[in-house]
Amino acid sequence: MAIDTSGKTPVNIAYINGNVLTSSSGPPSQAILIHDGRVAALGSNEEVLTAGGRSVEVQDVGGATISPGLIDTHPHLLHYAITMAPLVNILDAKSHDDIVKAINENASSVPKGEWIATTPIGDAQYFAQRSYRDLEGGMPDRYVLDRASINHPIIIQAWPPTCPNITAFNSLALQVLGIDSSTANRVNDVWIEKDSQGEPTGILKGSVNTYYNEDPFFAKLRDTKIAPYMVPDLIPQAVLSSLSDYHKRGITSIFEAHAMESSHIEVYKRLHDEGKLNTRVLVSTELESNALPGSRLKSMSEIVSTLEQTLSTRQSDDDWLRVDGITTCVWGIPTHDGLCWKEGYQATFGGLTTGKRNITKEKLEATFEFCAKTGLRLNLLSTSPDELDEYIETAEAVMKKYNIKKSDWLIEHAMIIREGQAKKLKELGFSVTINIGHTYGLGDVLDERVGQKSLEGLNAIRDLLDAGLIVGACLDWGPMDPWECMRLSVTHQMFPSGRFNDGPRQVISRAEAFELFTANGAAVMQWEGIGTLMPGSHADLIIIDRNPLTCDLDSLSDTKVLRTTVGGRIVYDNGEVGAKA
């Protein structure tokens, strides 16, 4: 009988001759039985076949490893899908000719005069190991892009968190933007490159990112003259495609925990209502957005309304989509001068800064009060020890006021912490999600702009685990491979320098790194039945070509996913499971 790999219906099946990782610490099993979307039995081949009965479908996985599906607790999946949907993808371009060809092929289906926007070049989103710098001739200028089309304005986008950054336009785009030889060489924090004759080359540098950008000059161009950041009609299919990409990476559950506005949440609700959602999704509402184009400050009455609306629409028992919690992003990262650092650090465009605050103290304290009174879960992005001090002090005050013993709240990122803060978070009942990409892509920047002291507490995962905290992990800005992120959680390597920040407060074991993306991720999401493979748990599992707990560490990032199953539904299959040699 053919096995249903459509992803539409649960498959009842016994996998035998495997290496079944029920968790990172328990002994592996030889076989596993899936029935009605749940794990029905584990054990030896004989035990599982007996439990399944004569009619059960059997598949020999030939020694492959079967693992719990992976969990990403801060993916921005929807936001990246929105960003990518209307773009020509040149991330993997190796030459100017590659770029011209990709844009030219797209131009034939775009009406004359309409914008063509592309991705940047390289390994998104830090572009730490590969970027436009690796192209012969460097960043394409107006003349290269004119080869792709003279009938469409063209932009090669710049993406955060890199700043200063670089973007490029063709000649028609410069005309549309009103940039010519008379335009100043620098406008605000945007530098307009010009040739020896004083003509713009089409390359702009500085504060030119598509989002996380409030530069008055570039933001006005972006919001009034450049192609819209999102195309609404493309969003649902773009999200489905991104979910499928996640299945190929072995990810079966996600926590959309940042910058999620009501319209974004509605996309997931629509997919769920249409029966198309085949990944488990938890969503938290943003208190006051400050990342995406169109973000604006809210009045205090609007803040209260957002909190009340979020509380009234909580949904925490569905098997596929849950909506719960309120998220704040009060500060930020150093590349946008958002890091809260009282001693001061080198600002992006010169001078010193102690950081730029996004959400007022009054709004933050009102949010703490509301969550303490109502039980709404509070998720706080935190990137510095000074920022975390404020959250700890405020939490202590409201918890004492309302006689709360454990907050059950969440710190997202905990990018830099000082010694002792992890223990305090544990006492207050917080959980944590970390992003090893901050070491990978921002470690060198932190060392340069903030100093060595910032590296001492950067991604101090060892501190967090030793304090007894529940710690999940994510892809966020990248690397966009969970297996590479596991490896980096062990090595703490920084790029582009290649140095290691593998101090005693950072380094964790391979098994612990695996737990960040499995059992711990489930605990952060407060979603029972995922993250492990035990009788009765959801049949969210992946079949992979190696054991991530024992394979050579350097080869961990080469792990290949052969099949992904969510709730017993096979949502991805590469054709190798059970294939004859």
Image: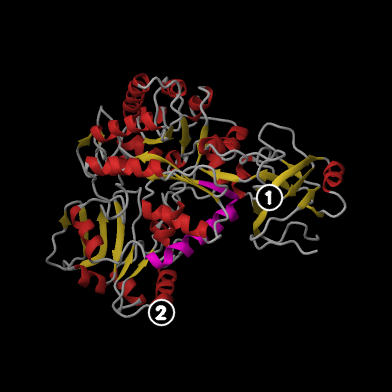
Seen from the viewer's position, the closer of residues 388 and 312 is 312
Please say if 312 is above or below 225. above
- Reading the image, the residue beneath label 2 is 109
Query: Does 186 sit left or right of 344 as displayed?
Result: left
89 or 293: nearer the eye? Answer: 293
Label 2's element?
loop
The residue range painted magenta reads 232-254
Asked whether residue 109 is drawn in magenta, I would say no
Quadrant of the image containing the C terminus = bottom right
Are there few (<14), some (14-19), or many (20+) residues within 10 Å of tag 1? many
Q: Main secondary structure of the magenta part?
A: helix
Q: Position of residue 218 (x, y in %)?
A: 22, 57
Q: Comparing marks 1 and 2, which lies closer to the viewer?
A: 1
Using the image, determine if residue 187 lies above or below residue 338. below
Kind of residue sitting beneath label 1: Gly
| Amino acid type for the residue under numbered disc 2 | Ser
* Residue denoted by label 1: 37
Name the one closer to the observer, 100 or 236. Answer: 236
Check if residue 238 falls in the magenta segment: yes
Percent position of residue 98, x then y: 44, 70
